[in-house]
């Protein structure tokens, strides 16, 4: 009851005209959900493209010079591995094999898959989030791990189901949840030798070597040692490789720019709609603003009313947009392109909503500041 | 004698531009004293509202000076003028200008809210002002639930709640019937009893003359005479 009258006037002005209120809120919700989806995709995509690097156990990655991302098909010679092992501070250097292969469904037909092979013993790049079976079973011949979200694509539905890759029998021994590729090609985890057989990679080759340093060894020093003695390769820390993969997919491909452009567009559309409704609301209430000015309200008092109106719209609009956003996040959680939401993104979205509404208020404020109080006598 | 609360000295005001330019005031000097109800009378278009606007710091004169409580207003910008208005002047308008979405009490509180007064004490003062104009039972009514006379009384409460040194009213009874108009004038003359407060009422209704301590006549942008009727109310 005892709230400041600027707030009361703002809320009455806002709710007074239902249609305009709905238009304002729809404008905000539309634009913030759009921004939310774009930014959520950006986050989700950014996380997905680095998921393999994130889940590998490595201090350093030996990769062919110029490698752009984890999925970049590449071959390194095994001899490099032995040379790496001779460098001071290197505890292990585990090969990883990647590549595409054809998966033959039990019922016939094929589908492309992305093979990820590693030493089961060192677990340098084992499947994670295993919900059925277990990773150690990958060491038995013909064993593979797949994600349950690809069951339909792969024509399997449970542990021990069988299929074929390159005329070789495979058997599902572990099932993961949410281990998905943004390329939509299913990941198939398997042991190193089998991965070579499936992808046609020679036995003395590997895509990467994952280096772990000895306890107490300095990663930077080990890296310098490796770089000095190995030719035609780059030695990257996990963070560097992750950033490189992400930058490649987000920026070199233009995907990130497209997402940002979408978000920016959402902001612009939202700002225009909110500015338009705020301005017309202010215009309609101009006689009241003139009365306020006449009885001595300061400029600050007048624009407080408008800013309150903008902020109130922002809070209501954001509340709705965030609820819709969480539904979208939930609905896409296990899809090929999950939309991610983090507390940081929520905070950014709220700030953007507030900024958008306050910027939208500028035109209305300019209008109100020009009011001639003497007009109160002529009505 | 009582003191001058507001004074115009040789004020001229040109309104409009080009062919539509009008000299609404041509050199008017007028002092309004505390403790008095001054009536400003004159035919339509004679410059009454213009003079009221200049005195009320809503229009800056083209020439001349306005002082309020001895302070000049010359050179003040829009923000300064707004401050002078909220510190010294209460306004009553012909068409009330109440806020339809606020209750009577909140409408009155607005007069203090623009001064930045804290809500609880402002509301108490708003209730007191409403009681003073005889609307103690209408605190929570919205303007649409009030008669014209009641709405104008709310407007008067809003004008006086900040205890201004001058109350300026432009045709406050023009939209009301005789009975309600007289009630409004009775309240305004009551307000003018305070020797530290002057009231200036613009009208062309001769029925208001009995309420005046002083009558000033304006014609064609010039003051043309003044009188002090003997008959004071009650
Ligand atoms: N904004 C304006 N632009 C041009 N001329 C104006 C303007 N406002 C008023 N005038 C003119 O100035 C003169 C004085 O107007 P003012 O409103 O002060 O008269 P008034 O005595 O209040 O009349 P009324 O009794 O009809 O209210 C009139 O001739 C009017 O037409
Ligand atoms: Mg007039």
Image (cartoon, rainbow, N blue to C red):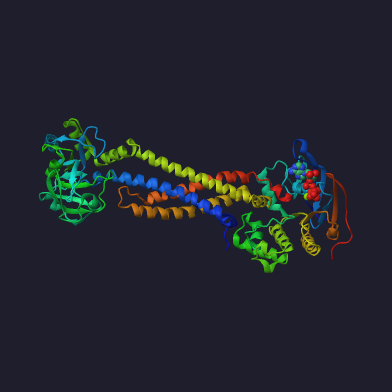
Give coordinates of residue B76: x percent, y percent. Answer: 69, 43
Q: Position of residue B139 (x, y in %)?
A: 65, 66
Instruction: Answer yes or no: is residue B48 visible.
Output: no
Can you tell which quarter of the image residue A116 is in? top left
Q: How many marks?
A: 0
Closer to the camera in the image, B34 or B59: B59
In the image, residue B75 sits, relative to residue B138, either above or below, namely above
Q: Is residue A150 above or below residue B145?
A: above
For residue A234, above or below residue B233: above
Please provide percent x and percent y for residue A342: 36, 51
The quadrant of the image that shows the N terminus of chain A is bottom right
Q: Is residue A348 left or right of residue A212?
A: right
Task: Residue B88 in the image: state x and y as whole percent.
Answer: 71, 52
Q: Quadrant of residue A211?
A: top left
Residue, x 16% and y 35% (percent of image)? A76
Indicate the quadrant of ligand 1 in the picture.
top right
Residue reaching furthest to the bottom: B137
* Residue nearest the viewer, comparing A168 with A82: A168
Q: Nearer the viewer, residue A51 or B26?
A: A51
Residue A337 left/right relative to B228: left
């Amino acid at each position: 009851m005892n709230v400041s009258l600027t707030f009361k006037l703002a809320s009455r002005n806002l709710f007074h005209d239902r249609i305009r209120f709905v238009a304002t809120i729809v404008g905000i919700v539309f634009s913030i959900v759009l921004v939310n989806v774009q930014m959520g995709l950006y986050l989700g995509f950014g996380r997905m493209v680095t998921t393999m690097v994130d889940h590998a156990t490595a201090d350093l990655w030996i990769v062919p010079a110029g490698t752009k991302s984890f999925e970049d098909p590449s071959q390194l010679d095994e001899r490099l591995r032995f040379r790496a092992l001779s460098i001071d501070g290197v505890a292990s250097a585990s090969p990883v094999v990647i590549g595409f292969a054809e998966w033959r469904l039990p019922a016939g037909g094929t589908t492309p898959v992305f093979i990820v092979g590693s030493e089961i013993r060192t677990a340098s790049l084992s499947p994670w989030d295993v919900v059925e079976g277990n990773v150690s079973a990958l060491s038995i011949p013909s064993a593979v791990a797949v994600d349950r979200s690809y069951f339909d694509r792969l024509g399997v539905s449970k542990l021990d189901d069988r299929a074929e890759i390159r005329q070789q029998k495979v058997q599902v021994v572990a099932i993961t949840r949410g281990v998905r590729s943004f390329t939509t090609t299913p990941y198939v985890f398997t042991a190193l030798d089998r991965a070579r057989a499936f992808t046609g990679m020679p036995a003395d080759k590997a895509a990467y070597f994952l280096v772990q340093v000895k306890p107490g060894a300095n990663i930077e020093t080990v890296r310098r040692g490796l770089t000095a003695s190995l030719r035609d390769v780059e030695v990257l820390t996990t963070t560097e490789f992750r950033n490189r993969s992400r930058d490649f997919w987000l920026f070199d491909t233009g995907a990130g720019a497209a997402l940002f452009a979408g978000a920016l567009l959402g902001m612009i559309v939202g700002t225009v709609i909110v500015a338009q409704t705020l301005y017309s609301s202010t215009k309609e209430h101009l006689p009241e603003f003139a009365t306020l000015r006449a009885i001595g309200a300061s400029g600050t008092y007048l624009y407080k009313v408008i800013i309150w109106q903008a902020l109130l719209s922002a809070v209501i609009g954001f509340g709705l947009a965030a609820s819709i956003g969480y539904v979208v996040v939930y609905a896409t959680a296990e899809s090929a392109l999950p939309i991610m939401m983090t507390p940081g993104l929520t905070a950014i979205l709220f700030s953007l909503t507030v900024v958008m509404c306050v910027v939208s208020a500028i035109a209305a404020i300019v209008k109100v500041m020009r009011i001639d109080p003497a007009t109160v006598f002529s009505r | 004698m009582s003191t001058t609360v507001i004074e115009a000295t040789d004020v001229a005001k040109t309104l409009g531009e080009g062919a539509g330019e009008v000299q609404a005031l041509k050199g008017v000097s007028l002092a309004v004293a505390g403790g008095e109800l001054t009536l400003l009378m004159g035919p339509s278009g004679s410059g009454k509202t213009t003079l009221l606007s200049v005195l009320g710091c809503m229009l800056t004169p083209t020439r001349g000076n306005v002082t309020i409580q001895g302070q000049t207003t010359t050179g003040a910008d829009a923000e300064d003028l707004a401050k002078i208005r909220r510190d010294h002047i209460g306004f009553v308008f012909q068409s009330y200008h109440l806020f339809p979405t606020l209750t009577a009490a909140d409408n009155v509180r607005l007069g203090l809210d623009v001064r930045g007064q804290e809500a609880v004490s402002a509301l108490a003062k708003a209730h007191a002002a409403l009681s003073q104009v005889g609307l103690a039972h209408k605190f929570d009514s919205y303007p649409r639930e009030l008669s014209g006379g009641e709405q104008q009384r709310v407007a008067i409460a809003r004008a006086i709640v900040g205890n201004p040194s001058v109350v300026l009213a432009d045709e406050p009874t023009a939209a009301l019937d005789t009975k309600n108009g007289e009630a409004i004038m009775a309240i305004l003359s009551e307000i003018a009893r305070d020797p530290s407060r002057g009231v200036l009422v613009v009208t062309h209704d001769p029925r208001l003359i009995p309420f005046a301590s002083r009558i000033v006549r304006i014609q064609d942008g010039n003051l043309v005479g003044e009188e002090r009727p003997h008959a004071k109310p009650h």
